[in-house]
Amino acid sequence: MKHTNKDTLAKGVKYLAGALPLIFIGPSILYSAFNNQDKALYWPILIIGILMSFGAIFLIFKGIMTLLKALFDE
């Protein structure tokens, strides 16, 4: 009988918990950047927002893959 690897499962949940704030903060920063295109800090804020959004996508992918590995690998 297969058993779930609890350490790997906890690691996957941590990845998903780390992605949760980035899911909301990244698009908010992008929205703020696009509303202030005439300001001097437009490009740095835009880059930070894009990096945070891609970070959220990466952490979600890594978290789901880790969860699947914990549940289905032997």
Image: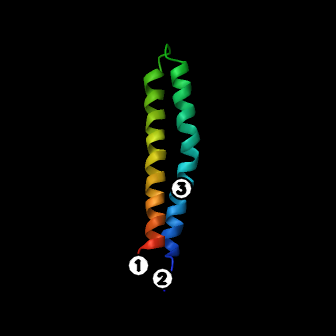
Q: Amino acid at mark 2?
A: Lys
Q: Closest to the observer: 41 or 55? A: 55
Marks 1 and 2, how far apart at CA? 7 Å
Q: Amino acid at mark 1?
A: Glu
Q: Is residue 16 above or below residue 8?
A: above
Q: Residue furthest bottom?
A: 1
Number of the label disc, if any, that sits on residue 2:
2
> Which SS class for mark 3?
helix
User: How many neighbours does mark 3 have within 10 angstroms: few (below 14), some (14-19), or many (20 or more)?
Assistant: many
Q: Nearer the viewer, mark 1 or mark 3?
A: 1
In the image, residue 48 lies at what x, y percent?
Answer: 46, 34
Residue under numbered circle 1: 74
Residue at 51% across / 76% down in the picture? Answer: 4
Residue at 47% across / 71% down in the picture? Answer: 70
In which quadrant of the rendered image does the C terminus lie? bottom left
Q: Nearer the viewer, mark 2 or mark 3?
A: 2
Residue under numbered circle 3: 16
